[in-house]
Image (tube, grey):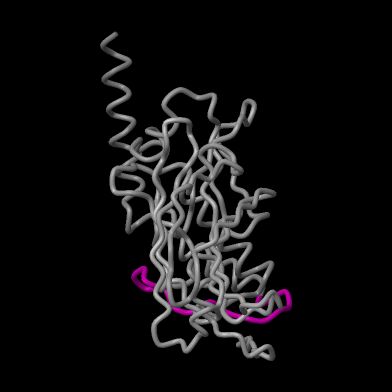
C-alpha cells in the first residue's frame, strides 16, 4: 500500500466539503455553483479562498472571499473550457498577506450535473464530444481521469450513448476492460483505499461492489500479469451480468429489426 506524507503541514480538505454543481448554458459552456464547508479545520478566517476549474489545457480561477466569509462570485461561466467539456475543480486556501503559502487544499473535485441534465454519470466516466472523423468513440486515458469521447458529428449521439441498448452493450464492457487494464496491469494500483479522490481508486471501489469480485492480484512478473488479466475478464463478465448486456443487445436488435422490416 502506498503511503503519503504531508511535510508541508497544509490541511487536506476532502472533496465532499466542496460540492460543485454544473448546469449547461445555451451556448454549450457550463456554469458552476459551489458550496464550501471549512468548519472545524482551524483555518485563519482572513485566509484567501480560491476555486480553480481545469480541463486539458484550460484553467480558470475564481476568488471565493475569505475562509471566515465565503462569497461565491456572480460570474461562474467556464468560458475557457471547451464547450461541453466537464472540468475538475480544486479549492485552495492561501495565507493572507501575499506570502502565497498554501494552507489547505481539496483537489480533483468531481462536479455533479444539475438534475435536469441527462448525461452519463460524471463521477466515474465523464462523456465529452469531439470531431473523431470516422470513429464513433474513443477512450481517453491521458488526462486526470478517463473520458469517453464521442463523435459530435453523429446526430443524436448524446441520446444514443445514454439510452440506446445496442450502444451501451457494445461499448461499455470494452471501456471497463481498457480502464482496468490501465489501473491494474500498467499502473499496478490494486488498493481501493489509496486515495478517495483518485480516479483509479474510485473505479476499484466501483468494481469491487460487483457480485463475486475480490481484490485484484498485485505485483509484477509474467505470472502475476496473467492473473491480473484473468481478474479483469472476471470483472467484465460480472459487469455484463449485472447490467444484462446480452439481453440489452437482443432487445435493441429486436427493436431495430422491427423498424427495418416496417419502412
- Residue at position x 52%, y 51% in the image: 175
Determine if the magenta segment contains residue 216.
yes
Can the viewer see residue 153? yes
The quarter of the rendered structure image containing the N terminus is bottom right
Boundaries of the magenta span: 208-224
Query: Magenta region's main secondary structure?
Result: loop
Left or right for 114, reference 101: left
Left or right for 167, reference 150: left
Give x and y (percent) for residue 26. 42, 31
Farthest-out residue, front: 97
- Residue at position x 34%, y 38% in the image: 165
- Residue at position x 46%, y 86% in the image: 41
Q: Nearer the viewer, residue 26 or 130?
A: 26
Q: Is residue 18 above or below residue 4?
A: above
The quarter of the rendered structure image containing the C terminus is top left
Q: Nearer the viewer, residue 104 or 156?
A: 104
Determine if the magenta segment contains residue 158.
no
Tally the marks. Answer: 0
Give x and y (percent) for residue 249. 35, 39
Q: Quadrant of residue 183?
A: bottom right
Farthest-out residue, top: 263
Give x and y (percent) for residue 82. 59, 39
Amino acid at each position: 500500500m502506498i503511503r503519503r506524507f504531508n511535510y508541508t503541514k497544509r490541511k487536506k480538505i476532502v472533496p465532499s466539503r466542496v460540492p460543485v454543481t454544473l448546469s449547461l448554458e445555451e451556448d454549450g459552456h457550463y456554469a458552476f455553483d459551489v458550496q464550501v464547508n471549512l468548519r472545524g479545520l482551524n483555518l485563519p478566517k482572513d485566509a484567501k479562498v480560491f476555486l480553480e476549474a481545469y480541463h486539458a489545457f484550460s484553467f480558470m480561477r475564481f476568488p471565493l472571499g475569505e475562509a471566515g466569509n465565503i462569497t461565491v462570485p456572480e460570474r461562474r461561466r467556464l468560458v475557457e473550457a471547451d464547450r461541453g467539456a466537464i472540468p475538475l475543480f480544486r479549492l485552495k486556501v492561501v495565507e493572507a498577506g501575499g506570502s502565497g503559502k498554501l494552507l489547505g487544499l481539496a483537489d480533483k473535485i468531481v462536479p455533479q450535473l444539475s438534475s435536469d441534465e441527462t448525461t452519463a454519470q460524471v463521477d466515474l466516466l465523464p462523456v465529452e464530444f469531439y470531431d473523431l472523423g470516422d470513429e464513433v468513440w474513443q477512450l481517453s486515458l491521458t488526462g486526470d481521469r478517463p473520458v469517453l469521447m464521442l463523435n459530435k458529428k453523429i446526430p443524436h449521439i448524446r441520446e444514443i450513448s445514454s439510452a440506446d441498448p445496442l450502444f451501451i452493450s457494445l461499448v461499455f464492457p470494452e471501456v471497463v476492460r481498457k480502464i482496468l487494464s490501465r489501473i491494474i496491469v500498467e499502473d499496478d494500483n490494486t488498493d481501493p483505499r489509496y486515495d478517495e479522490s483518485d480516479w483509479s481508486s474510485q473505479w476499484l471501489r466501483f468494481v469491487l461492489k460487483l457480485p463475486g469480485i475480490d481484490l485484484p492480484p498485485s505485483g509484477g512478473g509474467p505470472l502475476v500479469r496473467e492473473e491480473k488479466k484473468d481478474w479483469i475478464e472476471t470483472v467484465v463478465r460480472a459487469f455484463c451480468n449485472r447490467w444484462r448486456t446480452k439481453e440489452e443487445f437482443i432487445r435493441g436488435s429486436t427493436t431495430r429489426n422491427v423498424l427495418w422490416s416496417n419502412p
